[in-house]
Image (cartoon, grey):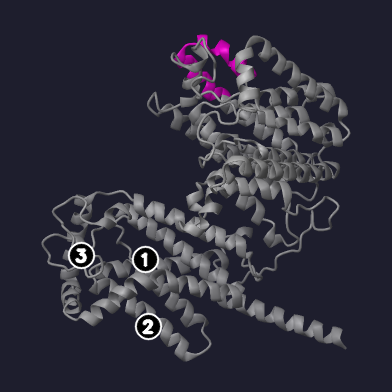
Amino acid sequence: MANAERGRAGAGALGAAAGPSARARLRAARTGLWLIAGILAVRQVAAVLTTPRGQRLTDLETWVGPEGVLHVKGSLYDSTLFTGTPFSGLVLKPLTKAAEDALGWGWIFGTLLLVVALGLIAARALPHPVGRRTSLLAAPVAISLLMLSLPVRNALWLGQTSIIPVLLVLLGCFVVRGQRAGGALIGLAAALQPTMLLFAPLLWFTDRRRAAASGGAVFAACTALAWAALPHDSTTYWVHHMAGVGLGGRADALANQSLHGALLRLGLTGPLEIALFLALGAAVAVLGLRRAVRYARDGQLLLAVALTGCAAVAVSPTAWQHQLLWVLLAVVGRVGRRACDRYVWPVAVILVMTLPAVMLLPNMAALHPLRDNAVLLAALAAATVVPFLSRTSEYYQTPVPTEYAPAVPARFSRVPLLPFWRRALNRPNLLLELLLIRVFYAAYSAVRAAAAGGRAVAEEHGRQIHAVEQALSIDVEHWANHAVAGTPWLEHFLGFYYESFHFVVPLALLGVLFARRSADYRWARASLGFATLLGLLGFWLYPLAPPRLMPGLGFIDTVHGAQDLAKPDYGAMTAVTNQYAAMPSLHFGWSLWCGIVILALAPKWWMKALGLLHPLFTVSAIVATANHWVLDAVGGATVVAAGFGLTYLLSGPRTAVRAAVEDDQVVRAAVNSVAGR
C-alpha cells in the first residue's frame, strides 16, 4: 500500500521554464516555512517548560510519578486514573525508575520528535501527481499544522502517548518495506489503542492480507503477553470495562469526542444508549471503511488512512481530545469542482482542529450540540459524507478557475499585486465566508477584551484626550450628555441605537453585497477587516477610559446605568468586556464604513442619504451617551480611511473591478446571443 506511492511526479529538477527568480522565491518560501515550523515548535515546548511543576505533564505524573498508579502494587485501574491498555502499562512500567526531571524533558522533546516524524511522513505520502513546489513545501506546512493542532498541544501539555499509535500506523503504511513488518507496526498500535484494529480490514480489502494477518497476530501476542504479566488488570480492562469503557474522566465530558460521548451528552443512557451507539458505530465503521478502500484503490492512500482513523475516532467508546489527530490528516482530501470551493474543507478542518469550539460557533443554546461535538462531526463528515474527488476526476488537478479582474495602471507600480490579493469577480463560498467571519469576530472579541492597560493608565489617557479637546474647543461631550439625559425619549432612542445597530447594519450590508454584488462584497469586506485590525492595534497601544468612567467629570452613563467609580470593578460589564477599548471608536468606524459603502454603491440618491444618516446617528449616540470622546470618532474615521487605502494598495480601485465585471457581462451576453442564433 505504501511502495507504489514512493515516486513523485515532478520530483526532479525544476523545468527549464522555471528561471532563477522562481527558484529563488521557492527557496525563500521553503526557508520561511521551516522557520515558522521551528518557531512554533519552540513556542509549544516553552509553553510547557515555563508552566510550574504540578500543572504540566499531569497525565505522565499520574502514571509514572512518585505517587503514580504504575508504582502501585495493586491494580492499575483501582484509581481509574490510568486509561491505557494493560500492554501500555507494561510498556510504561520501566519508566517509573527514571529521574523525574530527566523523564519530563525526555518526554517533551521525544514527543516533539514524534510530531516532526509524523509531519515528514504525511508530506511524503501525498498522492501523486505532486508538483515540485508542493513536494518542497508540504513538510514544513504539515509540521506547522501539527504543532498548532489541539491534539498535539494537549499531548505535549499532558504528557500523553496518543501520537505514538498514529505514527506507528503511518510507519506501517508508508515507510516500512514488506507487508509483515508494516502489519506488525499496526498491530502494535492496536495493542496500545484497540480501535486501531479498524485498520486490519483496510489492509485486507486493499489486497494486503499478509499485513492484516501480521497485525492481528502482533495485537494478539501483545495482549496475551500483558494478560500473562497482569492477569487481574487484563480482566478488568477487557472484561469488566469492555476495552476501557468507563475508565478515566466522565464519558459525557466535552473532551470525549466519540459517538458514545455525544449520545450521553444528549441525555441518552442505559441500554437504549448502548444499542444506539453500537448501531451507529457499526454503520460508521462499514461506510467509512468502504470509502477508505475506494480511495486507497484510487491511489489516495493517505486520505484512506485518515478516513479509517476518523471512523475509529467515532466508534471508540472514549476519544479524548489528544487522540484526534486523524481528523487533521483528512485535510489532504480534495473537495469541490470550483477553485473557490477548494479551500472550504481544509480551512474548516484546520479551524476545528486548532481553535476552541467556542470560537467557531456563537454561544447560543440551539447551537450547543454542534459546538460541543465539533470535532466528532468533522470526523463523521470525513468518514461518511464529504465528497472527496477521485484522481480520475477532471476537476482533481484543474478545478473550474476563479475569474479575476485585470491589473490596472491606477495602482502603485512599485507595490506587487500578489496572487492572494488579485480581485476575484465571482461570488466566494458562503460557508467559508461565514466560518471566517465568525472566527475573525471571536478573535476580535478576545483581543479587545485582553488589550493591555489598567484603570490608572486608561484614566490618564482620558485626561489627555479631554485636555486636547478643550484646547481645540470640541469638548462637547458633557453638554450633549446632560442634554440627552434630560430628554427621556431622546435618551431611550440613542441608547437603543447604540446597542442595536452596531452589528446589525454592517452584517446586513455584507449580506446584501454577497447576494447581489460579489466583486464589491470582496472590496467592502477587505476594507472592513483592515479597519478592524487597525482598531485592535489602537485598543492594545492606547487603552482609554470613556467619559462615563472618568471620575470627577460628572458624566451620566445613560446606557449601562450608574457606575460606582470608587470600586475597581464598577459594573457588571467589567467582567464581560474591556471597558477601555475606546480609541478608536469602532462603533463610529463601522457605521462610517457602512455609510461610505452605501454612498458608493447605492443606485438611488435617497438610499445614499439614508446610508449617511447611520454614521450621523451613531456619532451622536456614542458622544451623547458618554461612551466615547469626540476624538474617538476621529480615530474610528482614521482607521476606516486606512482600511480603504490598504484595500486600494493591495488590490486596486473598485471602479476598475466594476468595469471588468460589466465587460464580462457584455461578453457573456454576446456569446449567449450568438449561441441562441
Quarter-wise, where is residue 565 in the image?
Answer: bottom left
Residue 104 highlighted magenta (yes or no): yes
- Of the numbered discs in the image, which one, if any, rests on residue 613? 2
Upstream in sequence: badge 3 or badge 1: 3
Upstream in sequence: badge 1 or badge 2: 1
Residue 216 highlighted magenta (yes or no): no
Quarter-wise, where is residue 262 in the image?
Answer: top right
Residue 54, horizontal then vertical, whole percent: 39, 24
Residue type at tag 3: Pro
Asked whether 202 or 224 is in front, the reply is: 224
Residue type at tag 2: Leu
Question: Which quadrant of the rendered structure holds the N terminus?
Answer: top right
Residue found 71% across the figure and 33% down from its top: 121
Residue 442, horizontal then vertical, whole percent: 45, 55
Residue type at tag 1: Leu
Residue found 51% across the figure and 84% down from its top: 602
Q: Mark 2: give few (<14), some (14-19) or many (20+) Cα within 10 Å.
A: some
Residue farthest along the front direction in this orientation: 271
Residue wearing tag 1? 586
Residue 32, horizontal then vertical, whole percent: 58, 41
Residue at disc 2, secondary structure: helix
Read off the magenta span: 86-110
Q: Mark 3: give few (<14), some (14-19) or many (20+) Cα within 10 Å.
A: many
Rendered view: 160 above or below 522: above
- Of the numbered discs in the image, which one, if any, rests on residue 547? 3
Question: Which quadrant of the rendered structure holds the C terminus?
Answer: bottom right
Compared across the picture, whether 208 is left or right of 184 comes to right
Upstream in sequence: badge 2 or badge 3: 3
Residue at disc 1, secondary structure: helix
Residue found 48% across the figure and 52% down from its top: 359
Which SS does the magenta portion mostly show? Answer: helix
Asked whether 75 or 112 is in front, the reply is: 75
